[in-house]
Amino acid sequence: MLGVSIEGKKELLGLYLSESEGANYWLSVLTDLHNRGVNDILIACVDGLKGFPEAIATIYPKTEVQQCVIHQIRNSMRYVGSKHQKAFMADLKPVYRATNKSAAETALDELDAKWGSQYPIVIDSWRRKWDNLSVYFKYPDYVRKAIYTTNAIEAVHRQFRKMTKTKGAFPNENSLMKLLYAGILNASKKWTMPVQNWNLTLSQLAIHFEGRLDGELEL
């Protein structure tokens, strides 16, 4: 789990391993974060993992949950026929690149009208998850870039995979955790600068989350 501090710098909040995921698991993870001092989360970007938004609402009821738009697009395209993918993507772009939520909803209606009969499961997925997919529309572009996707943590995952792919096996879980911890230390050395346009972003957050920036902030 990756956070952004009130100074705008990335910080790895925790490394968790589990064979199964669900609401109970994520509840335990978030309880651990809370017990270790993460008192507030303004915006949490998640990748659609089952039970995660519900667990967040339990521990951090004031947190806005933004589902990763990139993950949603990838998952959607899995159900679109190859001969239609280029055209479908062209019609989908006005939805997630809209200037505001109202324009995005109009574009989603148009997408439904054109493709809904052929790919109802895709349209239904966007509509069912819309509350969490559309959170970022209330913010300007420089804030959206920080919250609309989980690409930052995916970059950490890629480093982890690079470290472990040459290992045939690990004698126990502890040895794996030690290797990943070393990877965390290496990754964090690069996180010396605030995220892009952080001063402007912080100003926006101070308005949207009035009174919640007095203590530690995790984005």
Image: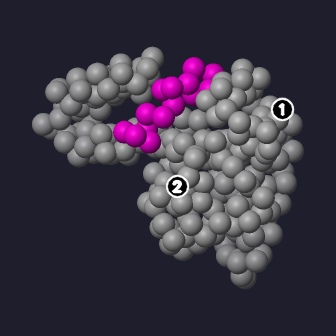
Packing grade of label 1 (10 A; few <14, some 14-19, many >=20) is few
Picture quadrant where residue 176 is located: bottom right
Picture quadrant where residue 60 is located: bottom right
Q: At 74% across and 55% down in the image, what residue appears? A: 38
How far is the residue under mark 1 from the one under mark 2?
Answer: 30 Å
Decide: is 70 above or below 97.
below
- Disc 1 target residue: 193
- Disc 2 target residue: 57
| Residue 180 in view, yes or no | no
Q: Nearer the viewer, residue 51 or 90?
A: 51
**Where is the N terminus found, in terms of image quarters?**
bottom right
133 in magenta: yes
134 in magenta: yes
- Say which of marks 1 and 2 sits in front: 2
Q: At 79% across and 39% down in the image, what residue appears? A: 214
Residue kind at label 1, given as amino acid type: Met
Q: Are marks 1 and 2 in contact (CB under 8 Å)?
A: no
Judged from this view, the residue extending furthest toward the front is: 211
The residue range painted magenta reads 130-145
Q: Secondary structure at mark 1?
A: loop
Magenta stretch: dominant secondary structure: helix
Residue 80 is left or right of residue 4, and the answer is left
**Where is the C terminus found, in terms of image quarters?**
top right
Residue kind at label 2, given as amino acid type: Ala
Picture quadrant where residue 204 is located: top right
Q: Secondary structure at mark 2?
A: helix
Q: Position of residue 181 (x, y in %)?
A: 80, 62
